Amino acid sequence: MQAKARPVSYQGGWTAMFMNDADKHSAHIHYSPTVNTSLGYKLEYWRDGDFTVNAIQMNNLLKRWNKKGSQANIYLKSGLGVAYSDAGDFDGETDPAGFVGLAADWENRRFFVSYENRYTEAGDIADFYTQSARVGITPYIGEFGDLHTWIMLQADHKPESDNTLTFTPLIRMFKGVHLGEAGISDEGDILFNYVIRY
Amino acid sequence: MKHIFLTLFLIFCISPAFAAEKDVVIKVNGMVCDFCAQSVLKIFSKEEGVTDIDVSLDESTVSLNLEDGATITDEKIAEIINFSGYDLVEIICIQ
């Protein structure tokens, strides 16, 4: 289960992701015309900054290592669109927006590690850098078709935030084409993610 | 009595347990996650002549049952495994 549930799907595959955490709510729907690329629409609402980003997002699989019993990936994620602020100093302002970041992961059937960073630029409304990492372990190794359960710890680093470093223990469960995650950060913020693949 | 035994024998022989042997077994590398391996199921299920697909994460294999008379080329299998995001290791055809 690669970084944020595989930003590039199988060739011809659709994926819909709905993410909610301490900072934002987001929806991302993408299509993979090739096994190395996905193209989709990304909607983000950043709560603290009270701004929305609508963007076209492209994900590129830069490198994959398929080994016996493990897989590792490096992805480039980038988006271009428009940011709109509906409160604060920039109430009613619309600016061009873009973001770019790298994501990497490694997993076998017992352990999982991932890292992801991103720089976001939205004109006067916002510009910031974030990075996050995850480690995970599954208490049991399920076969294909079983309900799979992972216990994970996510660390988020936001240099420009009041809480620079936060930790979120979470549970990831998936079966078939459905994947859900739920957790609570050490700041008491709820994480809830859902992904479906077509 | 002989007919009853014969009938039971025939039912037993054509039951799913005895029909479980697959026509093609494909060994792949990188298939460690159920959620991602759904891709294999989705792409092979679109393939004409494939009647059943079994994925084993334990064995790192994809096993196919084909319709009588149907064939699937090694090139097609390699392409599908590649489109699914994995590396093909070996194709074993069961006669």
Image: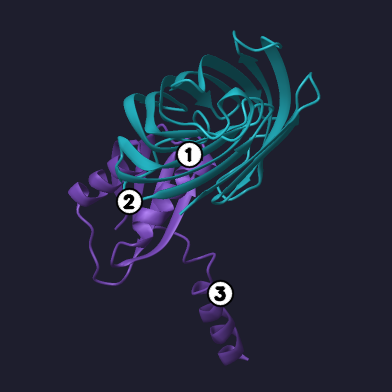
Front of the two marks 1 and 3: 1
Q: Which residue is mark 3?
A: B12
Mark 2–mark 3 Cα distance, whole angstroms, equals 41 Å
Mark found first going from the N terminus, 1 or 3: 3
Question: Looking at the picture, how far across and down is residue B50, in whole percent?
Answer: 34, 64
Q: Is residue B95 above or below residue B16?
A: above
Give the letter of the cyan chain. Answer: A
Along the line of sight, the residue nearer the viewer: B76 or A183: A183
Q: Is residue A140 above or below residue B66?
A: above
Point 46% across, 35% down: residue:
A6
Q: How is the image coloured?
A: by chain
Binning the other alpha carbons within 10 Å of mark 3 as few (below 14), some (14 to 19) or many (20 upward) gives few
Is residue A57 visible in this depiction of the protein?
A: yes
Mark 1–mark 2 Cα distance, whole angstroms, equals 26 Å
Q: Which residue is mark 2?
A: A12
Q: Which residue is mark 1?
A: B59
Marks 2 & 3, CB-CB < 8 Å contact: no
Chain B's colour is: purple
For mark 2, name the chain.
Answer: A
Binning the other alpha carbons within 10 Å of mark 1 as few (below 14), some (14 to 19) or many (20 upward) gives few
